[in-house]
Image: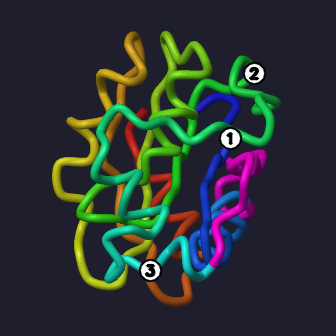
Amino acid sequence: MGKKLVAYFSASGTTAAAAKTLAEAAGAGLYEIRPQTPYTTADLNWNDKRSRSSVEMNDKSFRPPLADRDAPVEDCDTLFLGFPIWWYTAPTIINTFLESYDFTGKTIILFATSGGSGLGKTASELKARAPGAVIREGKLLNGRQSKEGLAAWAGGLSI
């Protein structure tokens, strides 16, 4: 599988927990995708059409600025990219992240956490954001994930 990196965005800590376990299980580096302005609880209120997350997700061209651009992606062959599912897809900050680096020749495997929906068309929607990369749908990592289970999943991927 070559050199691996787990990059993740987590608004509430759920995806962070899954990402940390996956990085340990896959023998991968770990990088947190952080917004320049952290999300508050009010920002994440999907029931409020004026909340920051609702406004961002309703504007397909919006790109939240990143806190930094220090992800060591040039050193990896395989990137596990994790995020919570928002409105049946990846949060717009994932578009910002993918458009900020050159992923040519890399394999990107998606993983997500969700309160009720699956990955849907997320992989196909993100392909245009990382031209030259292979983006593969991975799996939902809801609930407590075992290191052993994630090692088996990551080791079983044909990359």
Quadrant where the C terminus lies? top left
Q: How many marks?
A: 3
Q: Earlier in the sequence, mark 2 or mark 3?
A: 3
- In which quadrant will I find the N terminus? top right
Tag 1: amino acid: Leu
User: Tag 2, which secondary structure?
Assistant: helix
Instruction: Identify the residue at image location x=70%, y=57%.
Output: 23
Q: Which mark is residue 5?
A: 1
Q: Which residue is mark 3?
A: 45
User: What SS does tag 3 mark?
Assistant: loop
Residue at x-position 45% and y-position 73%: 141
Give the quarter of the image for residue 119: bottom left
Amino acid under disc 3? Asn
Q: Magenta region: which residues? A: 24-40
Q: Nearer the viewer, mark 2 or mark 3?
A: 3
Front position in the image: 30 or 146 = 30
Labels 1 and 2 touching (C-beta < 8 A): yes
Applied colour scheme: rainbow
- Based on the picture, tell me whether residue 34 belongs to the magenta stretch: yes
CA gap between label 1 and label 3 equals 30 Å
Q: Seen from this angle, which residue lies furthest front?
A: 50
